[in-house]
Amino acid sequence: MIEVRPAAVFDDVAAVLGLRRADANVCWCLSYRIPSKENVVLRGPARGERVRELCAEDVPPGVLAYDGEEVVGWAAVHPRADTGFARTRTIPHVDELAVWSVWCVRVRPGHRGNGISHALLAGAVEFARANGAPAIEGYPVENGGRKVDLTMAYVGTRALFERAGFVKAADTGSVLNGFPRVLMRLPLR
């Protein structure tokens, strides 16, 4: 059985998002989470250290999925106002609600195809609800069932979000891997 918990344990976040080499400049799911200027200057191990700081905050940077005690997946979820989505021109603001955003769903290799992305998305919704979010948004690709390259699949698909109860709220000006992204929303109150 998959359990989803707040991502407050840095070592578990590192197991999903971390480095294979200490000097690598992997995403660490910071691209949308921190200001663009900060994201550009953080290199190598400093990226992981920034995530360690985020994990120690009162509201961690996302949720983790566990199969027993083994961490098997990650979802980034936080108030939209604290993300790059607050400032982007390609993904519209539907209204003035203080919505939360879920922008990355990642399942570790060897665990894919077992419904973990569904559990992660459900866990992200519950995490946002528990922290007072009035609604939650995601920005998945509209792929019409066609294969999405694994390096770009982190945003999820419209079908994944629909299965979790989200509905399309708007088109966006964003395209990923050749697929348009749509704004999906789920009211939480």
Image (cartoon, grey):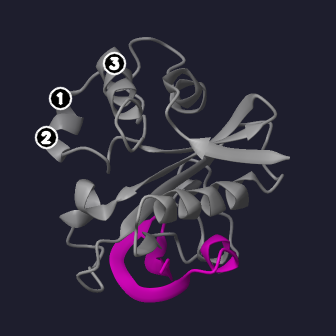
Decide which of tag 3 and tag 2 comes sooner along the chain. Answer: 2
Q: Which residues are magenta?
A: 160-189
* Residue 177 visible in image: no
Amino acid bearing label 1? Val
Q: What residue sits 47% from the left and 81% below the top? A: 189
Residue 25: % across, % down? 37, 25
Is there a contact, CB below 8 Å, between mark 1 and mark 2? Answer: yes
Q: Residue furthest top?
A: 22
Principal SS element in the magenta part?
strand
Q: Nearer the viewer, residue 63 or 184?
A: 63
Asked if residue 167 is among those painted magenta in the image, a careful observer would answer yes
Q: Nearer the viewer, residue 3 or 47?
A: 3
Q: Which mark is residue 44?
A: 3
Residue 173: % across, % down? 31, 78
Mark 2 lies on residue: 37
Asked if residue 165 is among those painted magenta in the image, a careful observer would answer yes
Residue 4: % across, % down? 67, 47
Identify the element where label 1 is drawn: helix
